[in-house]
């Protein structure tokens, strides 16, 4: 698989399995919430605002920025970076297999949904296969996460957890906003 296809597949997988994990500051604050720290960038903010009040767009771009900022915040040492690269390299084939499975099961589900006639059984079977692929990819993600966390300092682990909490809060707010419209 070419590097650009692998990168695209990795991005798709990250979205499918909850973001690999791996976006900006929390999106537009409501009046009753405290303001975000000064200087905290909000990638995609202008585009999201131009698109109107679309919570999923804001969530997606803000979460991408949180991940990007986290990389800078962690201030990883050269040794840590080398160890993390080695971990990722050690799992390269497993990651590629998981991404391939996610891609194939996603295509099969789309084909079932887009069929000329609704076949509930075929759609559910395709969704079950995709669920299995997501489950397997999630287990792999958890294993790799544990290996990477072992390379980080306790402070860095706290920063990672805080960023992931912020990402989840963004998702929760976006879903709540959609549900309240």
Image (tube, rainbow, N blue to C red):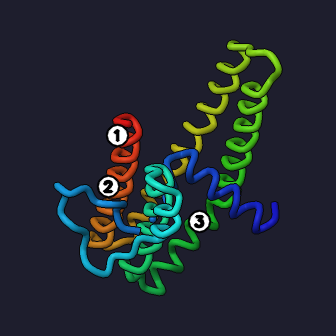
Tag 3 residue: 88
Sequence order check, earlier mark of 2 and 1: 2
- Kindly state the secondary structure of the residue where label 1 is placed: helix
Measuring 41% from the left and 39% from the top, which residue is drawn there? 178
| Residue 174 visible in rendering | yes
User: Of circles 2 and 1, which is in front?
Assistant: 1
Sequence order check, earlier mark of 1 and 3: 3
Closest to the observer, 75 or 154: 75
Measuring 41% from the left and 71% from the top, which residue is drawn there? 42
- Relative to 119, does residue 174 appear above or below in the rendering? below
- Position of residue 51 in the picture relative to residue 174 (left or right): right
Tag 1 residue: 176
Q: Are marks 2 and 1 in contact (CB under 8 Å)?
A: no
Closest to the observer, 177 or 89: 177
Residue 103 lies, in percent from the top left, at 72, 44
Residue 180 lies, in percent from the top left, at 34, 36
Quarter of the figure with residue 73: bottom left
User: Mark 3 packing: few (<14 Cα in 10 Å), some, or many (20+)?
Assistant: some
Sequence order check, earlier mark of 3 and 2: 3
- Kindly state the secondary structure of the residue where label 2 is placed: helix
Measuring 74% from the left and 14% from the top, which residue is drawn there? 119
Q: Are marks 3 and 2 in contact (CB under 8 Å)?
A: no
Q: Farthest residue toward the bottom?
A: 78
- Relative to 166, does residue 97 appear above or below in the rendering? above
Measuring 48% from the left and 55% from the top, which residue is drawn there? 52
| Residue 142 visible in rendering | no
Tag 2 residue: 165
Closest to the observer, 48 or 168: 48
Residue 138 lies, in percent from the top left, at 52, 44
Instruction: Say which quadrant the C terminus sits in.
Output: top left
């Amino acid at each position: 698989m070419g590097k650009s296809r692998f990168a695209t597949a990795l991005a798709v997988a990250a979205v499918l399995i909850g973001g690999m994990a791996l976006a900006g500051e929390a999106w537009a604050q409501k009046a009753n919430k405290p303001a975000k720290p000064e200087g905290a960038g909000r990638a995609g903010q202008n585009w999201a605002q131009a698109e109107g009040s679309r919570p999923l767009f804001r969530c997606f771009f803000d979460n991408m920025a949180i991940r990007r900022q986290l990389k800078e915040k962690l201030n990883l040492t050269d040794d840590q970076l080398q160890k993390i690269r080695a971990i990722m390299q050690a799992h390269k084939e497993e990651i590629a297999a998981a991404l391939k499975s996610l891609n194939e099961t996603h295509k099969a589900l789309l084909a079932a949904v887009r069929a000329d006639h609704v076949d509930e059984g075929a759609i559910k079977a395709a969704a079950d296969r995709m669920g299995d692929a997501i489950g397997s990819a999630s287990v792999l993600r958890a294993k790799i996460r544990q290996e990477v966390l072992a390379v980080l300092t306790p402070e860095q682990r706290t920063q990672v957890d805080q960023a992931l909490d912020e990402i989840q809060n963004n998702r929760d707010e976006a879903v709540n906003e959609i549900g309240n419209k």
